[in-house]
Image: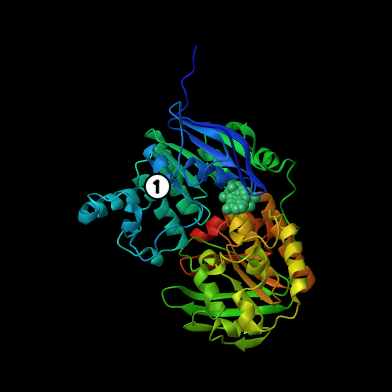
Amino acid sequence: MTQAAPLFEVRDISRNFGPVQALNGVSLALDKGETHSVIGENGAGKSTLMNIICGKLRPSSGSIHVDGRAVEFHSPLDAQMHGIAIAPQEINLVPHLSVAENILLGAHRGRAAAIDWRATYTDAAFYLHEVDDSIDPRMPVRELSKAQQQLVQIARAAATRARIIIFDEPTAALTWRETEKLMRYIRKVTSEGRSAFYISHRLDEVRELSQRITVLRDGMNVGAIPPQEATRERMVSLMAGRPPKAGRQPIRHLDEAETILDVRNLGREHEFRDVSFTLRKGEILGVSGLIGSGRSEMAKCLFGATRADTGTVALEGRETRFRAPLDAIRAGLIYLPEERKQEGIFPLLSIAENTALPTLDRFSGWLRIRNRDMLNEVGALARQMKAKFGRLGDPITSLSGGNQQKFIIARWLMREAKVLIMDEPTRGIDVNAKLEIQTVLRRLTEERGLSIILISSEMEELLDVADRILVMHEGEVKGCVNRDGTTQERLLELAMS
Ligand SMILES: Nc1ncnc2c1ncn2[C@@H]1O[C@H](COP(=O)(O)OP(=O)(O)OP(=O)(O)O)[C@@H](O)[C@H]1O
Ligand SMILES: [Mg+2]
C-alpha cells in the first residue's frame, strides 16, 4: 500500500554560512490542517530552516517537496506561488506606509498602474480584522507598537492566501491576552485546512497548539515529541541534550535593605496615575501587567525620557527631577528599552563593536574600564548567557535573533549603575539561557549592589527571579507582593481586581 505524500516535506536539508553549519541533514513534513512546531535553543537553526522553506535562503543541499513533487525556490515569490508565506521573527515592514499598504504590498488588487485602493483597503482590513480587530488599517506602521507590528506581519502572510503559514516567534512581543487571540486565530485557519509551522520559546503555547513537535539541536533534527507527552522537562531536555536545571532563584528577604529609589504618586496624563513604590538596594523588583498597563510609559518617565505631571522620585533619599535621559544616566540610572531592536543594533558593525560602543558611552563619559577589559567582559558575559557566536569580530547580523538579544543585554549589564530598568529583556531567549541570565542578574545585585526594575510579560519569569512583584493595570498599581508564596493566579487576580 502506498502512503499519500504529505502536503509539504523537506528532505536532508543542510545549510552553512561560511564555516558555520546552521543546518545539518534536517528532514520534516507537514500535513494539511496541521500545526507543526519546531523548537530548539537560540541558534539551533529554526529561522534558517524556515527561511529556506519560504524561499528567502537556498539550502546548501537537500530537497523540498510540495504535494509529493520536488520544487526549487529561488525567491520568496516562488514559495508564495506554492502557497507558502512567512510571518518572520524580525519586523520587516515599511514604516512610513500604512498598515493596509504593508499587508497588501505585492498583493495589490489591480495592475500596478491602476491599483484599486478601495479593494486594497477592504482586503487588508479583512485579513487584519481576523488577526486583531483593534488596529486601524490606515495608520502608518511606525506608529504601532512592536506587538501590533508583529500582528500586521501575520495578517500580511495570511493575505497571500497561503496554504502554509510560517509563524517564526509570533508571540515574542505579545502579552498573554494577545497571545490567546493569536492561538484562536491559528486554530481557526488550520481548522479551515491551512497548515502552520510554528516557532516559539514559550513551550506552553507549543504544547497547546501543535499536532507535531520537532526539536532541533545544533542544526540537527534530534527527534519529535508527541504533544500529549510534551512536558516542559522533556522538551527542554531534548533541546539542550541534558536534563533541565532547577529554575527558581532562592527567595531573599531584603526588608532591611536601604531604599534606593522612592517613587511617590507619579503620574502622567493618559499614561499612568498615582504610581508609588520603593526599590531597595540590591533588589530585583518585577513589574507585571498587560500591554496598555502603563509599565513602559512609567519606566520611560523614571528615566527622564518623558516628564511626569505629578509626583516625586527620590534617588538615595534625594529628590530628583530628570529633565532628560542624560541626567538619569549621570545619576546612575540606566534603561534598556523595549524597542531596542530598532534603536539598539548597528547592523554594519561587529558583535564586539555593537556591545562595546553603545551610544550611552559617547554621551555619559564615565567609561572607566579599558577597551580590552571591556571585550573580555563582553566575552565572559556572553558565555555565561550561553550565547552562540563565532568570534566577537563577526557581524552582529550573523547571530540568531535570541543571540543578538543576549549581546544587547550584555551591553547594558556592563554599564556601572545604581539602578537598571529593563523592559522585556528576555524576549526570544530560550528557556535555559533565560535561567542563565537570571543568575547573572542575581549575581550583579549581590556583588555590585545593583538594583533592578524588571518589566516582563512572562509571569513565570518574574516568579523565578524577582524579590517583589509590582502589578500594574490600566495605568495604576494594583498591588505589590513578595514573590514568596505568590502564584501566577494571584498575579492575574491582582491585575484584574
Ligand atoms: N547570515 C548569517 N551569517 C552567518 N551565520 C548565520 C547567519 N544566519 C544564521 N547564522 C548562524 O546559523 C545558526 C542558526 O541560526 P538561526 O537564526 O537559524 O537560529 P534560531 O534557531 O532561529 O535561533 P533563535 O531562537 O535565537 O532565533 C546560528 O549559529 C547563527 O549564528
Ligand atoms: Mg530564530
- Callout 1, which amino acid? Ala
**Quick check: 107 above or below 350?**
above
Q: Residues within 10 Å of mark 1 (few under 14, many from 20)?
A: many
Q: Is residue 128 left or right of residue 311?
A: left
Residue 294: percent from left, percent from top: 49, 69
**Quick check: 374 above or below 187?**
below
Residue 90 visible in the snapshot: yes
What residue sits 61% from the left and 61% below the top? 396
**Quick check: 351 above or below 62?**
below
What colouring style does the render use?
A: rainbow
**Quick check: 428 above or below 238?**
below
Residue 13: percent from left, percent from top: 58, 36
Residue 420: percent from left, percent from top: 65, 72
Q: Secondary structure at mark 1?
A: helix
The residue closer to the viewer here, 231 or 189, is 189
Q: Which residue is mark 1?
A: 157
Counting labels gives 1
The residue closer to the viewer here, 341 or 294, is 341
What residue sits 69% from the left and 64% below the top? 467
